[in-house]
Image (tube, rainbow, N blue to C red):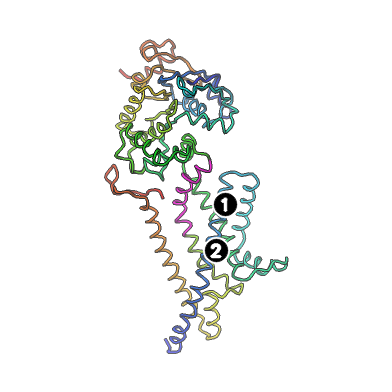
Amino acid sequence: MLTVRNLNKSFGETKVLQGIDLQVNKGEVVAVIGPSGSGKTTMLRCVSFLEKADEGTLDFVCDEGGADEKTETYDLHRASAHEIRQLRSHMGFVFQSFNLFRNKTALGNVTEGLTVGHRMDKALARKKAEECLARVGLSERADYYPDELSGGQQQRVAIARALALEPDIILLDEPTSALDPELTGEVLDTVLKLAKEGTTMLVVTHEMGFAREAADRIIFMEGGSVVEEGTPAQIFDSPKEERTREFLSGMIRP
Amino acid sequence: MSERLVGILLSSFTKILIPGIKVTIPLTILSFAVSLVLGLILALVQVMRIRVLKEIAFIYIWIFRGTPLIVQLFIIFFGLPGLGIMIDAFPAAVLAFGLNLAAYNAEVFRSAIEAIPAGQTEAAYMVGLNYPQTLFHIVLPQAFKIAFPSLFNNLISLLKDTSLASSITVVELFTSAQQIAARTYEPFALYCEAALIYLVFSTLLTWLQGYLESKLVWRSHDNTNVTAKGRKKPMVGI
């Protein structure tokens, strides 16, 4: 579905990403964990072109297993605006800080991309958006503005907004980091539900319990490199690398 | 107060008020319209970082904010004819006030646009909006709401600044007061009367601002009036 090769990125003198290779298969949930400043978020932003990488390629299989299956290769440094738009139409993104459109209702947030971005018929878009809000359990909040919703509800609207475009993959950047502890549960449950429905996802997270439960594969990053990857059991129960062990012992308290 | 003074004040009232309504108010509205359109364009070329135009906008704002309004008025009305460009007093005043205030409104628009978190723009890109769509559907509606009080503030300033048009022969509210004061030798009473009428106009504008702001807040509201947390609905989009 998505293969990243040799992703490099520096901010000034600081090398943030050093030759990242990464693969996500269709239907798979991959969780990226690691200490703050390890480049997890930057990696996600480079893959979606919100940040311009210095070097790297991305192979992306659109509509894998479908009638229109097609593999595109993108240069993460040099892709054209047209290519970027085309890739993004297959990709959903959920931000740490939700980034809902504050001048739109929950429903408006979900339909905006459909009607304005993809010129879908208004009635059709509304129906689609209502379905997506129902999937995240927010049908009753369709007419509420972001300011009137709790953080957890806002993030679920953001997930519905990403779902509406029927992306091949959803990238989630620390979806619960900006939430009060009592609100993280509802968002994680929503993501977990999508995982069970077979949604392909690449999730950067600090929630180890969630990563273990939701992910098919865990990638541990530190200092801009992938240190270790494996199944949740391999990473959490018998990590091979010393640094992984150190990180996890700090994160998970007995 | 002498009977004569009362008579002067009463008879002059409509003679000042009518030019106020017929000249000062249209002058204010037209100049403000020019300043809004031009101000928005100047702000957009800056936030969109359009080459050359961005520099032109910067220089424009630098000049129009950095020189006195009355000097700009004089250059347009008395100066341009020297270059063969003749403009009547009223349109010259509209032009001078509009061009001047555009520089201020440009800064109001620019700062309001920059106040919208970049994350919303990124989110818009990710759901397939292009830059103009993001600007017109997401950024500008919110920026306009932020800019609104400052724009109105500038409108009230403009209303009073139009009295400067008296110096280029436009017969507006203040000119009329000047003429009657010169004829009757009662400058104190007449100028106070003019001041009072300006005060009434600006008070009306202040009320209008309050009304429009409340519209801006409630306009797109639906059935519910209570938030998830049980509060009254806070500000919403337009």
Dot 2 alpha-carbon crowd within 10 angstroms: few under 14, some 14 to 19, many 20 or more? many
Farthest residue in the bottom direction? B3
| Magenta range | B131-152
Q: In the drawing, does residue B44 fall left or right of residue A101?
A: right
Q: Amino acid at mark 2?
A: Ser
**Mark 1 on the same chain as mark 2:** yes
- Residue at 38 percent of width and 32 percent of height: A159
The x and y percentages for residue B213 are 40, 56
Residue sitting at the far front:
A67
Residue tagged 2: B31
Q: Residue furthest left?
A: B230
Q: How many marks?
A: 2
Among the 4 quarters of the image, the one containing residue A18: top right
Q: Which label number is shown at residue A133?
A: none
Discs 1, 2 touching: Cβ within 8 Å? no
Q: Nearer the viewer, residue A91 or A242?
A: A91
Q: Secondary structure at mark 2?
A: helix
Most common secondary structure along the magenta stretch? helix
The disc numbered 2 marks a residue on which chain? B
Position of residue A122 measured from the top left corner of the image (x, y, whole percent): 41, 42
Residue B88 appears left or right of B163 = right
- The residue lying at 65 percent from left, 46 percent from top is B52
Is residue B6 covered in magenta? no
For label 1, the SS is helix
Residue A195 locus on image (x, y percent): 36, 23
Q: Chain of mark 1?
A: B
A219, above or below B31, in the image? above
Quadrant for the C terminus of chain A, please.
top left
In the rendered structure, which disc, 1 or 2, sits on the residue that comes first in sequence?
2
Label drawn at residue B41: 1
